[in-house]
Image: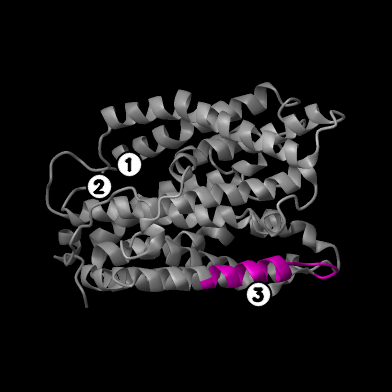
Amino acid sequence: MQPITRVIPGKSHRNNGLDTLRAAAIILVFMYHYMCFVSQEATFGWGSRIGWVGVDLFFVLSGYLISNQIFAGVARGQQLSLKNFYARRFLRTLPNFYVVLGLYFLFPVLMGGNTPPPLWRFLTFTQNLWLQPGTAFSHAWSLCIEEQFYLLLPAVVIIAARYGKSIRLAWIALFVLVLAGIALRTLLWLQYGRQAGGAIGGYYPNVYYSSFCRFDEFLPGIAVALLKNFHPRAWQKILRHGQALLLAGVAATALLFYLAVNYYMIDGYGYGYFMTGFGYSLLAVAFALLVAAALSPASYLHRWRIPGAAQLAAWSYAIYLVHKPLGMIAHKMLLGSGLNAVAEAGLIIALSAAAGWLLYLLVETPFMKLRDARYPSNFTPDVGPSLTAKAAA
């Protein structure tokens, strides 16, 4: 058994590959939402039809980035502070969220005209649970799942470090949880997956939006962070094969994109079992391969700096919040203007990027500066006995 104290901390840093993946995630989401809420057609071709997986990519990235922050600090012998962690997370995510949430409740007609769920559902991050499609600010469902993840992970890490004896138990837990996610989606697919009988109307509230059916998509990202921080020798060997990781990730992602386009929603039948039961988990694994490739200096994904990717990555959260209502508002205003579809799409893309940048500049950035000034670390200032050392004692 490998004790958790065998850790060599990795130095966290921003890199081109992760920026590229985050930029790709927001582009995918935009293309999907543009089809669903603006054009009502696959304006961006297969990208529109597959764009929903951008959220899955965000989940994997969050799984890696947040768990890596925690694991790296624990590896340095620092004591994780729940107060600091939650303060840093909330100052990072909630100001933007509250601004857009306020707009939905103050100007419901302008923001889409549909009725939002009760305010308390948003404030408690439970809006996604059994959410009915078509309600206002419905795209906040993924943010609720992320906030639930942020709330649970540090507490789980503290408990695991205190009572766990080996990192092997963490790997077993991840594997079991992935199987649990697949099993739950299988059972729910039997009830809501097919058009026969009309039960398919419950697919989105019970499967697509559900925390219980999507939590396992964070796990491959956590696995990458575990490997990086708790298996340093193996991690260094893996990093030497960055191009192989990239090739495997691209091939797996391309295959799953093909399956999702053709077999996720099947006309006249419903949702395909494989893509419902296994597809979400396999997509997350494919994206985790890309995350690992992004971390390898030997990979093109790590080395190549795509113009604009860093900016899109930085603004992606703000763009996610504003792009859907902006697209709907702009589309209504442009009706009858004679503007062709390409020009309209270009205008809405520009508006979404500009609004995301403004929200990032005026709201997100000041609160991140406040966060860094008041809570510069997720850990207590005094370095005491390592949580991992306690776990191994």
Q: In the depicted view, which residue is nearer to us: 324 or 98?
A: 324
Magenta residues, start to end: 251-269
Classify the position of the N terminus by image quarter: bottom left
Residue with the mark numbered 1:
85
- Identify the mark nearer the N-term, 3 or 1: 1
Residue with the mark numbered 3:
274
The reply to whether the C-beta atoms of the residues labelled 3 and 1 are less than 8 Å apart is no
Residue 158 appears anywhere in the view: no
Residue 319 in the image, given as x and y percentages of width and height: 56, 37
The reply to whether the C-beta atoms of the residues labelled 2 and 1 are less than 8 Å apart is yes
Classify the position of the C terminus by image quarter: bottom left
Name the amino acid type tagged 3.
Answer: Phe
Q: Is residue 186 magenta?
A: no
Magenta stretch, main secondary structure class = helix
Residue 327 in the image, given as x and y percentages of width and height: 70, 35
Residue with the mark numbered 2:
80
Q: Secondary structure at mark 1?
A: helix
